[in-house]
Structures are given as C-alpha cells and as structure tokens.
Image (spheres, rainbow, N blue to C red):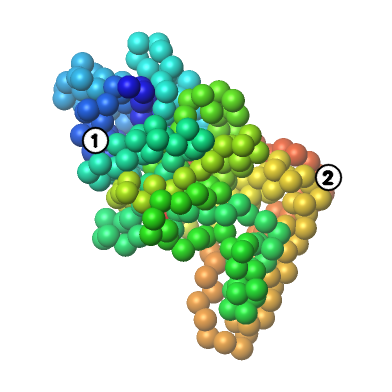
Amino acid sequence: MKTLLTVILNWRTAAMTLQSAEAALREMQDLPSALTIVDNNSGDGSFETLTAEVAARGWDTGQTPVRVIQSGHNGGFGAGNNVGIRAGLPNGARPDYVYILNSDAFPDAGAIRALYDHLNAHPGTGFAGSFIHGDDGAPHRTAFRFPSILAEFEASVRFGPVSRLLRRYIVAQPIPTVTTRVDWLAGASLMMRQDVLDDIGLFDETFFLYFEETELCHRLAVAGHAVDYVRDSHVTHIGSVSTGMRTWARMPAYWFDSRQYYFTKTHGSVYAIFATISLIFGSMLWRLRLLVQRKDRGDPPRFLRDLIAHAARWFARGAQHKMPPVQAPVTGPATGTVTE
C-alpha cells in the first residue's frame, strides 16, 4: 500500500490542533501512515503543550505515529507546511502521498480514505482535495479557476451582465456536486503525490499567506498534472481561527504582496500590471454604483486606497519579480488559506 504523511500546521491553536489530529488519526488507522504536527514558532507554549499531549495520549508510539516538530521561524503557511513535508516519515523514508490539513479542519468519516483511493485510481491526478463545509453544514467554495485579468475585473465590478459575459473566467466556481477536475483547490484539506512535489517543488516560501496553493497548482498544471475535487471526501472547516480574518479592519499588506507576486511569477510583470489595473478599474466602477445604490460595500475598509497605494509602490520599485520582507502580524498568520 502507498504510504501517507499527514501534516498539520499549528499557530497558537494547540487545543484545536489536537482535535484536528484526533479526527485525522481516526481516519488514518487503516492506512500505512504517520502524522506530523508543525508548530510554526507560536511562542505561546503551543509546542510544549502539543509535545506533552501527544506523549500523554500515547500517539507518539501508536499504530499511526505522531510527532511534533518546531519550524523555528514563522514563514507563513507554505513555509510551515514545507517543514513537515521535508521531514518525511518518522523512519526517515519519503511518503508516497502527503496530506496537508488545517488545524481548524476535521475530516469526516471516510474523508482521507476517499482522497487516498482517488489518487490510487487516477495516476494522472497530482493533487486531490475535499468538499469543505462549515460546522453548521454550510458548504464552502473551495474549487477555483486560476485568476486572470478578466477575472479580476469581473470580481471587482460585481455587475450581473458582466459576470454572465465573463462566466468562463470567474474564479470561484459553483460547488461541484460530483468529483471533477479544477484549476486549484483551497489548502484546508489537500492530498498530494510526493513524486509530483519532487518534480515541481514545494510551496514557494516567498508567499507568507494567500495565493501559495494557487501558485503551486499553477506549477502543477504547467507540468502536465491534474487537480481533482473529490466530492465524496467531506471535511468540516471552522475557518479564520488563526488568521483573525473575520475581525480584520483592513486587508493586510501581505495579501496585496502575495497577489502581486502570484501574477508576476506566473505571467510576468506586464500581465501583473494589467491585472492590477483591471482590479482597480472594476473596483472604481463598483464604488460609483454605491453612490446611487444601497449595497453592502463588500470589501474591507480602505481596500481600494490600499490597493492603489500598494500598486504605486510596486510600480516605483520597477514591478520586480519579488516581494518585500513580510512581518508576521501580532494576531497571527493562518495555518491555512481561509475559506468562507
């Protein structure tokens, strides 16, 4: 049987991480597997708590061995998961499959096995992800097309006729009712072939948070591999626990950095410039509508001003293929991409 390594990234959510690990262990017990919890330099005692609890519960010597490792540096979602992936299985062997699971995500019955069986049955599939729903049962949109210039305009202008005209470019897809092929999936519950990761590389650690799995899936597509949304794999996801996204007063700078870096890396600086102009133009048209219609603004406060200011700084730097250093926010980076 193929071997499986599950990686859960923790950042100041030790109790919830243990719940996630417990749910994952329940679903991994019939598979040749191991689980690694990576503490992303929480600095709040999480590493010590997780280490003690894993030992107290006997998980470290169980059928599916669990270990806790320290990243030593909070480099964000991708960098933290890379620490766990690079560590491999506890016996030093490389796994056949790697499964990344958010610390606020809990596999339902059969969820991990469904992804595992899907990869076994479809050798052309590089990554497989789950149907994600909230703890209230409400489904989350986690199946996407790649972002593009036209997609940026459609998402920002928010006008029905435009959306119908550009429907082939809309990023967030209707929630699939059957297993289907997509461009990219949210990283809350994602199983990946180790052979494919060896081929295309791990997460780009330039990203602190957001767009990292989008770019990884883009590299996957360029290399000729597929991403599948597996409808029979159900995972409960709380969402926004580590990010604090629900209470953001403004969009953080690292979101703008990641977005700009994604477009520049995948399509080049000229494309990134036009994608940003498209987003700004669409956002301006949307705000003109708000002057005459009573609608929810839909964006965090000062989003358009922050977008324009970020673009101006980026243009002033010469639209380079790099990002400025990112400082972790006090409220903390996520253990994964948030799905709403």
- Mark yes or no: residue 41 visible: no
Q: Relative to 35, say whether 333 is above or below.
A: below
- Residue 211, x across and y down, in percent: 57, 46
Q: Residue at x 46, y 63 (%)?
A: 174
Q: Residues within 10 Å of mark 1 (few under 14, many from 20)?
A: some
- Residue 19, x across and y down, in percent: 24, 39
Q: On the picture, is 323 further left or further right than 247? A: right
Which quadrant: the N terminus?
A: top left
Residue closest to the eye, 148 or 75: 148
Residue closest to the eye, 124 or 159: 124
Q: Residues within 10 Å of mark 2 (few under 14, many from 20)?
A: few
Whole-angstrom CA distance, mark 1 to mark 2, is 49 Å
- Residue 72, x across and y down, in percent: 46, 23
Report the label total. Answer: 2
Sequence-wise, which precedes: disc 1 or disc 2? 1
Q: Residue at x 53, y 86 (%)?
A: 294
Residue 306 badge: none
Q: Which residue is mark 1?
A: 27
